[in-house]
Image (cartoon, grey):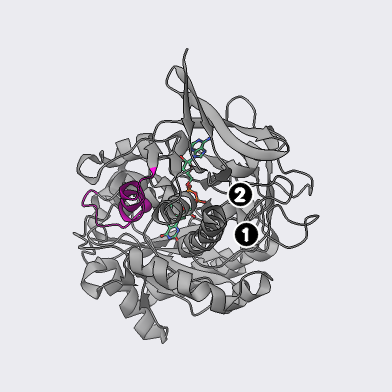
Amino acid sequence: METIRYNCKVVVVGTGAGGAVAGHSFASAGVDTILVEEGRHFKPADYPRVFDGFVNMYLGSGSTIAFGRPPISITLGRAVGGTTIINSSTCFRPPREKVESWGGPGWDEMLPFFEEVEQRINAKPADIELLGGNWRILKRGCDARGIELKPLVHNIRDCAKRGRCAFGCPEGAKQSTDVSFIPGAVESGARLLTSHYVDGVIIENGRAAGVVGKHGDNRFEIRADSVVLSMGALRTPTFLMKHKLATSSRRVGRGLQIHPAGRVVAEMDEIVDGHIGISQGAYIDHWADRGVMLEGIFLNPGIMMTSLPGVGAELKNLAAAYRRLSAFGSMVSDTSSGRMLPSHFGDPFTALYQINRKDTGNLIFGIARIAEIYLAAGAKRIFTGFHPVPVVDDEKSLKKLEQARFSPRDLEIMAFHPLGTCRMGADARASVVNFDLETHDIPRLFIMDASVIPSSLGVNPQITIMSLAMRAARRLAAKLKS
Ligand SMILES: Cc1cc2nc3c(=O)[nH]c(=O)nc-3n(C[C@H](O)[C@H](O)[C@H](O)COP(=O)(O)OP(=O)(O)OC[C@H]3O[C@@H](n4cnc5c(N)ncnc54)[C@H](O)[C@@H]3O)c2cc1C
């Protein structure tokens, strides 16, 4: 075994929403940067099939969960581009009142970063013609109920309606960070090391001085003035706990929030062809004030069918009706919070998350609102993912759904937005990093990823993560240059 050695000014671990933007910001400011990524560098032209996407681009082949009742599927990307390579390309700025409540950079300071990120990733409301049949069905139901359905803002260019955003866009249309930030970082001189797994931080004289890890059969060591961890909200705290780094506040790994979500599928009489177009096209923020956001989602047949009830001929008939299915999701701004535990047996992380009654109630409320809209749109059957009332097909069964006694275990819950496990704050006893995203405990050790966000956002987080990383990286670059 050989140890390969590198030197640079800043080493960034992870190339997702936080890491790629940080790396780009450093490199374009002329700072000698190395980006280290555990996953492979897929190119749009060689994106694998959907099933291969699970195996290759998803951490643990998409099998990662948070433990609780029920266990919650919580998936992450593992590739250059991180989770942005498998995300649904939906873009939201964080709600203004959330940003103001953090006590750090306020809305006016963050606004130019939101704008710059949005411009670079081409975040714009999607054309209605890209939203496919799902939009048509939901629009009819929303119009009948007097509720506004809006097209989501997406970071795409020249979308070819392939409908498989969550498995890597084969057209390179999605402006995930492997497309939007990494090439510019490399052009500006950053070095990108792929299939490199970081397993330690070098600490010298009490400050971060580099990272070590493995690449194939070899070890590597990267010496740097500053170390930026951007491994995501589940893996950064796991890493810190394992290596007993920056843990003095006892807040590392605490405060996990995930935006628990449920999916509703409706069987229509007409052809919907929801798989043609952007997978997550539209949203309804009518109930956002109570913490419920409804967003479209459509999946390919193999994955969609596993979430539907029935076996044998019944499931086969439903599969045959795939072109007549429409789907939408409900997402909750959580008041529940979970925590990370030290990981064992080589697991990439161990997360505990128990959804509380308030959030469960909100999730069911959202599912009921979608069912109501689908009924108004003329759906024959609506599959709720809620075990006591798995199917809604009329007002009576909808009422039954709303009035059912529920336990969280009765729900199929999934989550896509882990946040808040190494929160930023001014108080070193109550947070892990300061507002420059430097750990309170270890000088020159930074965290620039979803971990630092101090509260559930209620909206998809990539713009928030990218903008906070851009601000912190620019500030560090200015310090390093001077
Ligand atoms: C299916 C899905 C759909 C989503 N849709 C949306 C959406 O439409 N809009 C939105 O805003 N958000 C969406 N999200 C969430 C969003 O993509 C994430 O919140 C965001 O990418 C998180 O950024 P991050 O930098 O914290 O981590 P990540 O993007 O997860 O990046 C972390 C990177 O670090 C690497 N890494 C970890 N450990 C190591 C190590 N030890 N050594 C080297 N590398 C390491 C990982 O391989 C990974 O590439 C979605 C998520 C999922 C799963």
Crowd band around label 1 with a 10 angstrom C-alpha radius: few (<14), some (14–19), many (20+)? many
Q: Earlier in the sequence, mark 2 or mark 1?
A: 1
The quarter of the image holding the C terminus is bottom right
The one of 144 and 235 positioned closer to us in this rendering: 235
Residue 457 position, x and y percent, is 57, 66
Q: In this view, does 212 lie above or below 256?
A: above
Which amino acid, by three-letter code, is at mark 1? Asp
Residue 287 seen anywhere in this rendered image of the structure? yes
Mark 2, secondary structure of its residue: strand
Residue 440 position, x and y percent, is 73, 51
Q: Is residue 103 above or below residue 298?
A: below
Which amino acid, by three-letter code, is at mark 2? Phe
Q: In this view, does 246 lie to the left or right of 314?
A: right
Q: Which residue lies furthest to the bottom in this view?
A: 146
Image disc number at residue 475: none
Residue 349 seen anywhere in this rendered image of the structure? no
**Magenta region includes residue 390:** no
Task: Report if the beta carbon of the residue with label 1 is closer than 8 angstroms to ligand 1.
Answer: no
Q: What residue is drawn where x is 47% and y is 49%?
A: 19
Residue 469 position, x and y percent, is 52, 58
Evaluate if marks 2 and 1 touch, with contact meaning CB atoms under 8 Å apart: yes
- In the image, the segment drawn in magenta is 170-190
Crowd band around label 2 with a 10 angstrom C-alpha radius: few (<14), some (14–19), many (20+)? many
**Magenta region includes residue 183:** yes
Question: According to the image, label 2 marks what residue?
Answer: 446
Question: According to the image, label 1 marks what residue?
Answer: 436
Mark 1, secondary structure of its residue: loop
Q: What residue is drawn where x is 41% and y is 87%?
A: 146
Q: What residue is drawn where x is 32% and y is 78%?
A: 139
